[in-house]
Image: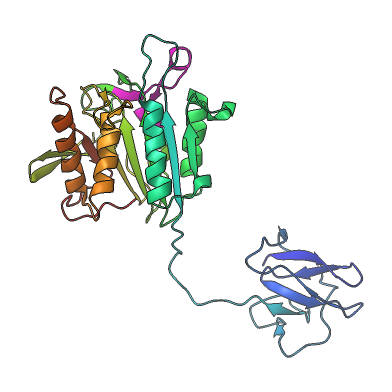
Amino acid sequence: MTSRVERCSGCGRQLWLPPQAVAARCYACRSVTSFPSSSQRWAQVYGSVSQPHHNVVTTVPSNYVAAGPGNGKYPRQGCNNYYIDQPRPAWSPPPVYGRKKALLCGVTYNDTNYMLTGSINDVKSMWFLLFRMLGFPSDCVVILTEEEKNPYRIPTKQNIRTAMRWLAQDCQPGDSLVFHYSGHGSRQKDYNKDELDGFDETICPLDHETEGPIIDDEINTTIVRPLPHGAKLHAIIDSCYSGTVLDLPFVCKINSEEYKWEDQRIPTACYKGTSGGIALSFSACSDNQTSASTSAFSGKDVTGAMTSSFIQAVKNEPCLTYGRLLTAMGDAIPSLMPNDTDEPQLSASETFDIFTKQFIL
């Protein structure tokens, strides 16, 4: 049986107690000392006690629990310790926390010949949607752009990696996570043979030319695999070659009111699902297509077509299903950009009926 050591509030002597004790009477000065409640951090719990317990409660108040020999609780046989027992609530299901966290990353690649003009606008628009309309707390939304003054909020490879770890850290049942990325995407040869098409999809941080891209395997490991049962992740990826950039097992192919899920899993590859939660990703295009930016949605500011169509659909149509959201995005882009043939993609960690499951961030 384990025990812990507390100090008597009267004389300072050590009191050896079971872990669940919340108060005890000192044998020497007769003072009763209370200890932190279960909502606070318990004092250090020591290993099995090999010495006799000399500090004992010698008087038994009515609300104290006897822990003498033979009752199977505590302490060692031969001691007459008494203590107030920690209340034991009835069993209940794991709590639902319902926290909302988001990581918004926009990379413009200033002063390069591949500079983008709409990425920061995408982040600002997504922040407005999450904070102003969907109730995400401002201190739980991390923004990485080149406009940020804090050097740790610049979208370098290391900063994006750190922010992704923050997003998934301590995720609990009921949590809702959002990862939005607007920037360049690319693809490279798949060396661990876990891609059907032979290529890993990537996102390109600000310093990708020197530090390299972040590949889908790493994104999956960092923000998909840790999701526990009851938690969900939505990714909105506005970049080229982004169809399976989260490496999720299933891709939805939709045609009018019909759809099917394509299984991307390879039997010999490592597991790419969650730890019980659900992950979903809306991507600007399939793995072999490029995405587009336009001013058509705002009338003046350049934005990513995929990000703008996503936000427009969520704002305009309450109680969306995933199928209706995907259809609305697919309809909005060609109506404003007739020459763009790319279609938003939906991938997921599990299959479901996209026309009955409601979209909720």
- Between 108 and 40, the residue placed more toward the observer is 108
The residue positioned farthest toward the front in the image shown: 299
Q: Quadrant of residue 123?
A: top left
Q: Quadrant of residue 30?
A: bottom right
- Between 135 and 79, the residue placed more toward the observer is 135
Quarter of the figure that contains the N terminus: bottom right
343 displayed left or right of 40: left
Pinpoint residue 340: horizontal percent, then vertical percent: 16, 24
Observer able to see residue 205: yes
Pinpoint residue 215: horizontal percent, then vertical percent: 37, 25
140 displayed left or right of 215: right
Q: Quadrant of residue 174?
A: bottom left
Is residue 218 shown in magenta? yes
258 displayed left or right of 137: left
**Residue at position x 37%, y 37% from top?**
125
* Colouring convention used in this rendered image of the protein: rainbow
Above-or-below relation of 232 to 151? below
Pinpoint residue 148: horizontal percent, then vertical percent: 53, 28
Is residue 61 shown in magenta? no
Pinpoint residue 22: horizontal percent, then vertical percent: 71, 73
How many numbered dots are placed on residues in this image? 0
The residue positioned farthest toward the top in the image shown: 113
Above-or-below relation of 261 to 291? below
Above-or-below relation of 14 to 206? below
The magenta segment: 200-219
Above-or-below relation of 257 to 119? below
- Between 80 and 211, the residue placed more toward the observer is 211
**Residue at position x 57%, y 76% from top?**
88
75 displayed left or right of 15: left
Observer able to see residue 269: no
**Residue at position x 45%, y 64% from top?**
94
